[in-house]
Amino acid sequence: MKKLKAGIIGIGFVGVAHIEAIRRAGFAEIAGIAGRDYDKTTKQSERLGITRVYHSWQEMVSDPNLDIIHNCTPNHLHFQINKAAIQAGKPIFSEKPLAMDSRESGNLVGLAKEKGVANAVNYNYRGFPLVQQARYLVQSGYLGDIRLVHGSYLQDWLMYPEDYNWRLETPLGGKSRAFADIGTHWCDLVQYLTGLKISEVLADIKTIIPERFKPETSVETFSRSPDSTNQLEKYRVETEDYCALLLALENGVRGSCVISQVSPGRKNRLYLEIDGSKRSVVWDQENPNYLWIGGRDGANMELMKDPSLLCQGAKRYADYPGGHNKGWPDGLKNIVRNFYG
């Protein structure tokens, strides 16, 4: 099988994760990368074993030798890069959000349909084996009629005033931060698992740290506060650190969720419970190889990730035998594999 040639735009935390996932999925080779700083990107290419470095994303998108583009840039660049790739007839695998607002997103959806270009937005938590198993339990009727969905998505990487990242700047990240950055993952899982759309939302939103200290140089996602040698300037933050949601879904289902990037000790805890008329199911991203299943009239149980115990649809996401744990990189690899395959 001839491998496709993939180009990666943006080589921060997520871009490097995409490179690993593409290589593991096996359908494509990394033909080149592009980043904000050409010299830094060149050094990164040497570390990653990639020979081609483009001077700009425009140069990459216009390269006729590339088969597919992965857009791993900050949010404000998503629309223009995604649009350019679609217009060039290149399949585009974009990090979320698809664009900065619904108008831009609608433009891209219409353009992709018009051009017939394959496209995807990366909601990688769908790629976990036990998320697939939970979906089977929900949609097969094992839980009964769905009544409630509830949970949280909590992080602590922005809990100090000195913690900084481009996501804090509205022109780069958008008008929403905590919800747009991680809350959308939680909501996507709710809709994906239940097959029901969220129809109404009531939200309490707050910027808990309205003033932060911006470093002179850029700070990588999830990195610690900058050291004392990095000069800081005060920056007024407009986007939310926290939000609490009351939700209405189709068919009368109700839900609630708390989103935070300032919760000490919570590194990346996406927690979701779905309550049915017979049973409940819980998946916790920080303990992703177990699925809790609860009922009133018998013992609760915890299903361990083991292909021999999973439904047919979930088995293909498991890869290895029981006891061989799966994690965040594996979920992303599965989503990339689905797109390419």
Image (tube, rainbow, N blue to C red):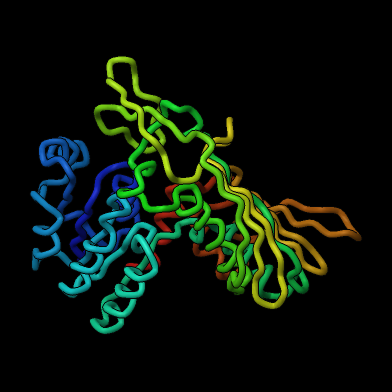
Residue at coordinates 51% horizontally, 56% vertically from top-left?
185
Residue 331 makes an appearance in the image: yes
- Outermost residue to the bottom: 114
Quarter of the picture containing the C terminus is bottom left
In this rendering, would 251 be left or right of 69? right
In this rendering, would 274 be left or right of 186? right
Residue at coordinates 47% horizontally, 35% vertically from top-left?
210
In this rendering, would 232 be left or right of 242? left
Query: As rendered, which of 111 and 24 lies closer to the eye?
Result: 111
Quarter of the picture containing the N terminus is bottom left
Residue at coordinates 32% horizontally, 71% vertically from top-left?
119
Q: Position of residue 177 (x, y in %)?
A: 44, 48
In this rendering, would 182 be left or right of 198? left
Q: Position of residue 29 (x, y in %)?
A: 21, 57
Q: Position of residue 95 (x, y in %)?
A: 35, 57
Residue at coordinates 30% horizontally, 74% vertically from top-left?
107
- Outermost residue to the right: 297
- Residue 47 against residue 254 in the figure, above or below: above
Query: As rendered, which of 238 and 81 lies closer to the eye?
Result: 238
